[in-house]
Amino acid sequence: MEIKKTRNTEKQNLVRDILSKTAHTMSVEDIMAAMPIKVNKTTIYRILDRFAEKGEVHFVTGKNGKAYYALCNNCGISHKIHNHIHFECQVCKEVTCQPNTLNIPNLEGFTIQETQFLVIGICNKCKK
Ligand SMILES: [Zn+2]
Ligand SMILES: [Zn+2]
Ligand SMILES: [Zn+2]
């Protein structure tokens, strides 16, 4: 039991470390490929789920339906209600968190539980 716990913590730290070093968001596959040790997809999903619950990471669903994860920092009031924009580049496929934020409208009679903002186009690196 003790060993398993240590290993899980180690894996969590690795995922956190990988996400902290990237300038863009990462899919589960990206994280898996960047891991220095072999960790299966389910385990990474589980780690990311736990991080998302705690407000350590958030994700946005890309055009291909995949979730792209990023570490949370200065997320504001609620980690479920992120109001910054994500940009998905059609050329390099990178999904990045943008500093630009949107005002989330008050939807009469509806309860907002989560928000995701995705803008699709060509990034400044690929435009040149
Ligand atoms: Zn957040
Ligand atoms: Zn690009
Ligand atoms: Zn983001």
Image (tube, rainbow, N blue to C red):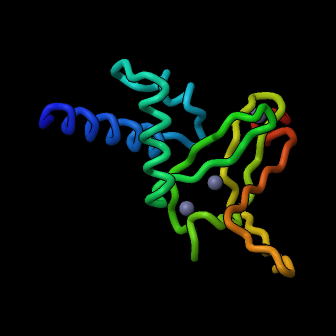
Relative placement, left or right, of 73 versus 67 is left
Quadrant placement of the N terminus: top left
x, y percent for residue 29: 56, 25
Extreme residue toward the front, this view:
109
Q: Residue at x 73, y 51 (%)?
A: 86
* Residue 56, image x, y percentages: 46, 56
Outermost residue toward the left? 2
In the figure, 42 relative to 9: above or below?
above
Residue 2 horizontal side relative to residue 116, left or right: left
Q: Eyeballing the image, is 74 above or below 13? A: below
Residue 22, horizontal then vertical, whole percent: 52, 40
Pick the residue in front: 15 or 46: 46
Q: Position of residue 14 (x, y in %)?
A: 35, 36
**Which quadrant of the picture is home to ligand 3?**
bottom right
Looking at the rendered image, the quarter that the C terminus falls into is top right
| Rendered position, 78 above or below 98 | below
Look at 77% across and 41% down and name the residue there.
88
Residue plotted at (78% across, 69% down): 102
Relative to the observer, which residue lies in front, 102 or 105?
A: 105
The image shows a total of numbered marks equal to 0
The quadrant where residue 26 appears: top right
Residue lying at 46% horizontally and 25% vertically, measured from the top left:
34
Q: Nearer the viewer, residue 31 or 107?
A: 107
Determine the image quadrant of residue 79: bottom right
